[in-house]
């Protein structure tokens, strides 16, 4: 093993220990920085935004798996259970659709403009974290929404993009990976993660090493021995996401999650539908998005389909209404300025959908 490799491993291990040990005793910063940090690189940030949109479908799958992994963290799960806003499919639909909308605003708008939708969205999310922190402390749950919790949640949005890029069929260069790290380092900073605990600070290989340790020592054991209420919350999450991805099957997607993370599946797939949906998921990432001649057609198609589905559920949630009733329309009365993805044409079929 070379000295450089040893150094990277040592730095990654040190950062991991700082996050999971020191970070568990320090709350998220209650005062949010308004401007971008001095190390901010606008060109790199924009490249990270484009990287996301050019792999929208695979990134969406990665983020959904990341949300499942985050639910294995007891301190995070306790807050979600206590607030009771995502414990049933309809509640999960509302909560996680809002999460998706916030994330897409970060990926779309100018983060350097304090009046932009990106900055306003960051301010809203930071306020929600601070409120959850106060309520948790008053309720007797103890310190919640810590720097550790924030860094582990950060992993949910970018960790698998680094560790399972090939398995998820995400296409991009190392510079694209650095760009997505810079994007999430910036968003983490704006959400109150101190640089010391920011998972995305450091070199690409150092961050990849820290993410590997988090997957190995935090999330893999959490999948094997999940905390109480984990399965109920995951079931609510995946059923809540069915209006966006109608063929989602809880058992099949959990099997895919376990296999992607290198963890034995806890329960075999019993129904024919679950087995079929698992095979479809594997085939999509291993064949349709991997073989060049197929990916040239299916990547833009799947990207467009997922983007359109998200937009439709924000503006005209007909599928959600069929599943949850007409109450879903009332929450959408005040939705404004959501722009659908560009139409899929012969001209943009080969181009990444990067403009939303």
Image (cartoon, rainbow, N blue to C red):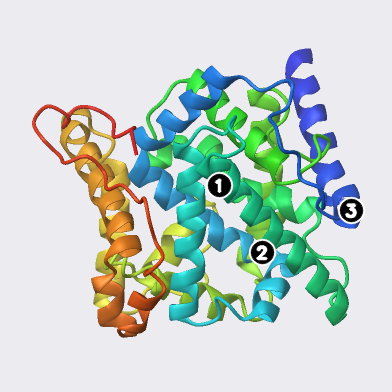
Image height check: is 150 above or below 119? below
Q: Nearer the viewer, residue 348 or 260?
A: 348
Image-quadrant location for residue 349: top left
Q: Quadrant of the N terminus?
A: top right
Mark 1 residue crowding within 10 angstroms, few (<14) / some (14–19) / many (20+): many
**Label 2's element?**
helix
Image height check: is 66 above or below 35? below
Left or right of residue 253: residue 67:
right
**Label 3's element?**
loop
> For the residues marked 1 and 3, what is the alpha-carbon distance in whole angstroms?
22 Å
- In this orientation, does residue 248 appear? yes
Mark 1 or mark 3: which comes first in sequence?
3
Which residue occupies 44% across, 79% down? 89
Q: Nearer the viewer, residue 30 or 75?
A: 30
Left or right of residue 154: residue 20:
right
- In this orientation, does residue 259 appear? no
Q: Position of residue 187 (x, y in %)?
A: 63, 39
Q: Quadrant of the C terminus?
A: top left
Which residue occupies 57% across, 24% down? 178
Question: What residue sits right under mark 3 in the picture?
Answer: 26
Q: Nearer the viewer, mark 1 or mark 2?
A: 1
Question: What residue sits right under mark 1 in the picture?
Answer: 157
Image height check: is 218 above or below 18? below
Mark 1 or mark 2: which comes first in sequence?
1
**Label 1's element?**
helix
Q: Position of residue 73 (x, y in %)?
A: 70, 64
Question: What residue sits right under mark 2 in the picture?
Answer: 222
Q: Which mark is residue 14?
A: none
Q: Are marks 3 and 2 in contact (CB under 8 Å)?
A: no
Image height check: is 209 above or below 192? above
Image-quadrant location for residue 231: bottom right
């Amino acid at each position: 093993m070379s000295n450089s490799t040893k150094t990277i491993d040592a730095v990654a291990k040190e950062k991991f220990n700082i996050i999971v040990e020191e970070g568990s005793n320090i709350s998220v910063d209650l005062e949010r920085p308004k401007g971008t940090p001095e190390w901010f690189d606008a060109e790199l940030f924009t490249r990270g935004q484009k990287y996301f949109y050019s792999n929208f479908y695979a990134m969406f799958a990665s983020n959904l798996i990341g949300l499942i992994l985050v639910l294995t963290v007891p301190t995070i799960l306790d807050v979600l259970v206590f607030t009771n806003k995502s414990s049933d499919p309809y509640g999960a639909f509302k909560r996680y659709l809002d999460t998706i909308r916030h994330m897409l605003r970060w990926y779309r708008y100018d983060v350097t403009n304090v009046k932009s939708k990106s900055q306003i969205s960051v301010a809203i999310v930071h306020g929600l974290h601070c409120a959850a922190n106060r309520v948790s402390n008053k309720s007797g749950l103890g310190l919640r929404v810590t720097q550790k919790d924030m860094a582990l949640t950060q992993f949910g949005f970018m960790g698998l993009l680094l560790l399972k890029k090939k398995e998820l069929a995400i296409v991009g260069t190392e510079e694209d990976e650095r760009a997505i790290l810079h994007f999430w380092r910036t968003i983490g900073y704006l959400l109150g993660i101190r640089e010391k605990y920011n998972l995305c600070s450091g070199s690409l290989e150092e961050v990849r090493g820290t993410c590997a340790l988090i997957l190995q020592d935090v999330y893999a054991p959490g999948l094997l021995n999940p905390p109480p209420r984990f399965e109920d919350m995951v079931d609510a999450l995946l059923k809540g996401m069915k209006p966006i991805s109608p063929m989602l099957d809880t058992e099949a997607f959990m099997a895919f999650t376990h296999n992607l993370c290198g963890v034995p599946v806890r329960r075999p797939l019993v129904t024919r539908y679950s087995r079929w949906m698992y095979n479809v998921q594997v085939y999509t990432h291993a064949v349709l998005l991997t073989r060049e001649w197929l990916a040239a057609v299916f990547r833009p198609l799947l990207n467009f389909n997922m983007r359109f589905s998200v937009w439709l559920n924000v503006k005209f949630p007909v599928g959600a209404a069929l599943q949850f009733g007409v109450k879903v329309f009332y929450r959408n009365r005040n939705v404004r300025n959501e722009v659908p993805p560009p139409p899929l044409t012969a001209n943009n079929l080969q181009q990444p959908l990067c403009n939303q």
